[in-house]
Image: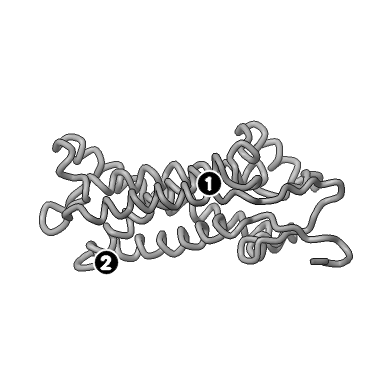
């Protein structure tokens, strides 16, 4: 593929893109179902179980998956992220094929917050109709802590998502970095002298699908 005589390369593999858009869809449904409650709470809990499986898959894929999906290849310190943001607004930031340092921090924050949100949801109850599948596995004190964290994280997650969306829009329209399209079709323009790695990680993909799938199916088998 070519774009303005500059080659395009597949940066975001299919598993990463499917994870991203499935996560977006699940998050929207979880917010709506959590707000409306009622009979939607059963689907809210089941979707929360699926969310926890997605996080497990992303962790496995982030360790063993393709080059740009691996945490070790894009996670940088907060200081590096800050330096990147300063350079960005000065107009001399470096070019990153995958996540830039600031985006990497946001990815980690979202994954950690979503992981905590999913885990605390598994042990909470509304004391009337529904309980998380692991509620009976913990004592009342842990369940109460879980419920408190779950409700507090809801606000934090919404704020993180708003910041994430605004950052994407700024990069997309102000800095002319087509990151939304790249997360759909997977391709980005190759910077000069950039080394491209072939993405062949079938064993990691199978491992991630098997482990995360088994976890979700086990949770779904438990009484709510």
Name the quadrant containing residue 172: bottom right
Q: Quadrant of the C terminus?
A: bottom left
Residue at left offset 27%, top offset 51%: 218
Q: Residue 211, position in %: x, y? A: 40, 47
Number of the front mark, 1 or 2: 1
Q: Residues within 10 Å of mark 1 (few under 14, many from 20)?
A: some
Q: Is residue 124 left or right of residue 50?
A: left
Q: Residue 214, position in %: x, y? A: 34, 50
Q: Residue 19, position in %: x, y? A: 50, 57
Q: Which residue is mark 2?
A: 36
Per the image, label 1 sits on a secondary structure element best described as helix
Judged from this view, the residue extending furthest toward the right is 5
Relative vertical location of residue 222 with respect to residue 35 in this rendering, above or below: above
Q: Is residue 120 left or right of residue 111?
A: left
Residue at left offset 64%, top offset 56%: 12
Q: Quick one: 185 or 200, which is closer to the camera?
A: 200
Q: Quick one: 189 or 140, which is closer to the camera?
A: 189
Judged from this view, the residue extending furthest toward the left is 128
Q: Quick one: 47 or 172, which is closer to the camera?
A: 47
Name the quadrant containing residue 136: top left
How many numbered marks appear?
2
State the CA–CA distance, disc 1 to disc 2: 38 Å
Q: Is residue 91 left or right of residue 134?
A: right
Q: Residue 205, position in %: x, y? A: 52, 51
Per the image, label 2 sits on a secondary structure element best described as helix
Residue at left offset 40%, top offset 61%: 26
Q: Which residue is mark 1?
A: 204
């Amino acid at each position: 593929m070519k774009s303005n005589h500059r080659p395009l390369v597949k940066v975001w593999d299919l598993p990463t893109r499917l994870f991203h858009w499935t996560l977006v869809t699940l998050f929207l449904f979880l917010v709506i179902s959590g707000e409306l409650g009622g009979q939607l709470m059963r689907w809210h809990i089941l979707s929360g179980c699926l969310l926890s499986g997605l996080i497990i898959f992303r962790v496995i894929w982030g360790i063993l998956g393709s080059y740009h999906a691996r945490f070790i290849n894009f996670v940088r310190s907060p200081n590096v992220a800050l330096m990147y943001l300063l350079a960005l607004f000065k107009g001399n930031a470096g070019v990153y094929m995958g996540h830039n340092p600031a985006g990497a921090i946001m990815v980690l924050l979202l994954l950690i917050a979503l992981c905590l949100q999913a885990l605390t949801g598994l042990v909470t109850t509304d004391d009337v109709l529904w309980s998380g599948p692991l509620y009976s596995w913990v004592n009342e004190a842990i369940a109460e802590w879980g419920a408190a964290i779950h409700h507090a994280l809801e606000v934090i997650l919404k704020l993180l998502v708003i910041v994430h969306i605004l950052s994407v829009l700024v990069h997309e329209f102000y800095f002319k970095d087509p990151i939304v399209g790249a997360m759909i079709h997977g391709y980005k323009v190759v910077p000069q002298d950039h080394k491209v790695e072939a993405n062949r990680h079938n064993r990691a993909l199978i491992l991630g699908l098997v482990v995360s799938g088994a976890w979700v199916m086990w949770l779904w088998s438990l009484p709510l």
